[in-house]
Image (cartoon, rainbow, N blue to C red):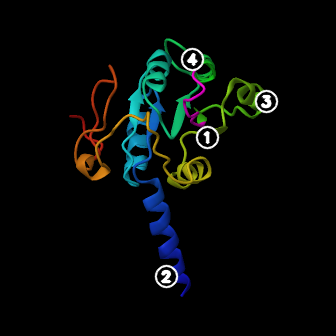
Amino acid sequence: MIFAARLHDLVARQHRRAGLRVLLAEAGTDERMFTTAVLGQWGILPTLACDGAQAVRLAQSREFDIVFMDVMRPVIDGVAATARIRQFEREHPSRRSAPIVAYSAVDLSAEARHLKRVGFASVLLKPCSARSMGACLDRWCPRPTPSPNAHADPPVGALAHGPAPVAGPCSPTVTRTGQRA
């Protein structure tokens, strides 16, 4: 009976996570590949941004359920990018605000108050485990909430074997199996 309850809970979480619209703002190729693979196990294909300016452009052009923002970003750092995204949301009040998670290899607990003021929802230390990433998704994205303004992505199953979508010059493209395309 306990096994059946755990299995039911696992399937429910898998179903809840599948199809989430995730923006992964990560410059590091290895971390991008790892995080894409972790998200892929739940049927999530993230949209990738390789620098802060690209993350801002993407967040302004479509809606996401959650954003994982590397704090140490090239071009515009993650804190400044988050501030720009939050400013855009204030200027467009009909736009749904997505939680932005500071995704960092550096312990940012001393800066937690400042990060919250800027607009981060929480901090996730990397490298993180699949369990930590899943807990973060479950906390901030209890279920996908389609919006009439949302970017129309193809169904998850249609992308299951294709390359992860790359929004810009994040060469090389990495497939779901972790191989370079």
Taking the image as shown, residue 11 lies to the left or right of residue 101, namely: left
Amino acid type at mark 4 = Asp
The numbered mark, 3 or 1, whose residue comes first in the sequence reads 3
Q: Nearer the viewer, mark 3 or mark 1?
A: 3
Circle 4 residue: 77
Q: Alpha-carbon distance for marks 3 and 1?
A: 15 Å
> Is disc 1 surrounded by few (<14), some (14 to 19) or many (20+) residues within 10 Å?
many
Looking at this view, is 49 or 130 the one in front? 49
Of circles 2 and 4, which is in front? Answer: 2
**According to the image, label 1 marks what residue?**
124
Q: Are marks 4 and 3 in contact (CB under 8 Å)?
A: no
Query: In the image, is residue 53 above or below residue 2?
Result: above
- State the SS at label 4: loop
Q: Position of residue 105 (x, y in %)?
A: 59, 33
Q: Residues within 10 Å of mark 4 (few under 14, many from 20)?
A: some
- Which residue in the structure is indicated by mark 3? 113
Is residue 101 shown above or below 79? below
Residue 84 in percent (x, y) is at: 59, 17
Main SS of the magenta segment? Answer: loop
Element class at badge 2:
helix
**Sequence order check, earlier mark of 1 and 4:** 4
Q: Earlier in the sequence, mark 2 or mark 4?
A: 2
What label sits on residue 4 in the rendered view? 2
Label 3 crowding class (10 Å Cα cut-off): few <14, some 14-19, many 20+? few
Q: Where residue 92 appears, x then y in whole percent? A: 57, 22
Element at label 1: strand
Distance (Cα) linking label 2 and label 4 = 45 Å
Is residue 49 or residue 140 the one in the foreground? 140
